Image: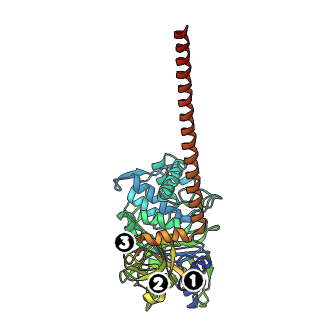
Amino acid sequence: MKKLIFFICSLAIIITSLITPVSAQNYINSVQNEKVKLNCKVDLLVSLDDGSVIIEKNADTPVAPASLTKVMTALVVLKNEKNLDRKMVVSEEAITSLYGTGSSSSGIKAGEEISVYDLLVCLLIPSGNDAAMALAIEYGGTAAGFVEMMNSTALALGCKNTHFENPHGLDSPNHKTTAKDMVLMAKAALEYTAFETIVSEYIHKLPATNMNEERNVVNSNYVINPYRTTYYNKNVKGIKTGTTDAAGRCLISYASKDGYNYMAVAMGGGQLDSDADGVEENQAFMDTNHMYKWAFKNLKYEIVTQQGQFVCSVPLEYCADSESAKLVAKSEVLALVPQGNDSESVSFRPVDVPESLAAPLKKGDAVGKAEILFAGQVIATVDLVVAEDASYDLFLYVKSVITNSKTFITLIVVVIVLCVGAYVTLFILSNNKRKKQREIKMVKYNELRRNTQKKNK
């Protein structure tokens, strides 16, 4: 009876785990519950500390990125240029190729001698398409050659849903990326100090050149501009804006506060009076601030799983001391969860755990993993190990073989077949031996008889 009850309980747990839907960590409903609506078509917030996804909406959907493209343009240049102070000459093609496109411009001119660093400033701060073309032609030979470099770099970073067709982000049918791919690109670009420095400036003074006087360029990212009070957020440090008809309003940025670091992507935003003040706001900027505000206010690292914490049991075979093996967490797990929640607020869902185990087992043996769930959503995983030693009992093994009628009958049949086969083989061999002996005797007898007859004659 005890075994039957244990089996039924185990089966119920397994069935429950199978019908429970698996989802990624996503606190978007928590944000919306605070009467803050995220209005962009695409929203994504990830932790830069552990890589966990905090908020996501259509983050894997390929969409037009507009000038977020220039993050990759800058990355390709930085990967291929060691001396950012090197002067280059802006080609005429870089300027004339943009005629009639209505492109954003940084004001550089054909024939202008300017450093690579200052061109990156023109690319990233005022979002100059002219700077994008100048850099593309310089490092790719042609714009098409540079685009090939962009796509190969994206692929190397693991951007599986990205395809570029130009270096600036003007709308093109197959020029698309995803919010998650943009995070990969931005993280790679932020590894370069020059990129990190440039994107954090809301205003930059460009030195005089052979064709331009000293001048200031202002960042198109109003979230880092203290004079744009509607959008300004002192915790935000960049990164890049984008706007086209197909892409809508876009922004990728990162922010830090109290030791917590996040990156946010908002794409496909419009102009909307979302705060009922009679003025339409850029929804990429608004969504970005809403996501950061909620995360900094609500999320905190908590110990959601203790080392050695019991997770589940599985039936144990061939052990006299116990009918089940206890599986526990191999290590302590920290996760970002709403403040005030601890290990009692989470549950576990075993994955890759066998339906049963067989002795012998040693304490600490690895046995699968478990997903850690908070409010029904996966927030982390933990390796599972055996909690106690389990010794092997030969008698129980033999008993289980006998109890398993199919196995027992099969074993008996095999033994009988082997015995019969051995008997038949021995019988045939013995019979053949006797037959040969008789033949030998007959030959000798005949020979003896012939010899006798010869003597008598």
- Above or below for 42 versus 122: below
**Residue type, label 2:** Ala
Residue at the spot of label 2:
295
Q: Report the residue at 47% width, 89% height from top.
A: 345
The reply to whether residue 107 is in sight is no
The label nearer to you, 3 versus 1, is 1
Q: Quadrant of the C terminus?
A: top right
Quadrant including the N terminus? bottom right
Q: Please, what is the three-letter code of the amino acid marked with disc 1?
A: Leu
How many circles with numbers are drawn on the protein?
Answer: 3
- Kindly identify which residue carries mark 3: 362
Looking at the picture, how far across and down is residue 48, in whole percent? Answer: 42, 73
Are circles 1 and 2 on residues that touch, CB within 8 Å? no
Residue type at mark 3: give it.
Lys
Please tell me how crowded label 2 is: few (under 14), some (14-19), or many (20+) other residues with Cα within 10 Å. Answer: many
Q: Which residue is at 56% across, 60% downward?
A: 411
Give the mark toward the camera: 1 or 2.
Answer: 1
The first of marks 1 and 2 along the sequence is 1
Badge 3: residue crowd in 10 Å (few <14, some 14–19, many ≥20) = some
Observer-nearest of 340 and 16: 16
Residue 184 image offset from top left, x and y in percent: 47, 65
* Mark 1 vs mark 2, CA separation in Å: 48 Å
Tell me if residue 253 comes above or below residue 109 in the rendering. Answer: below
Between discs 3 and 1, the one toward the N terminus: 1
Residue matched to label 1: 4
User: Going 51% across and 56% down the picture, which residue do you hit?
Assistant: 155
Q: Position of residue 369 (x, y in %)?
A: 46, 72
Q: Residues within 10 Å of mark 1 (few under 14, many from 20)?
A: few
- Which picture quadrant has residue 387? bottom left
The residue nearer to you, when weighing 313 against 25, is 313
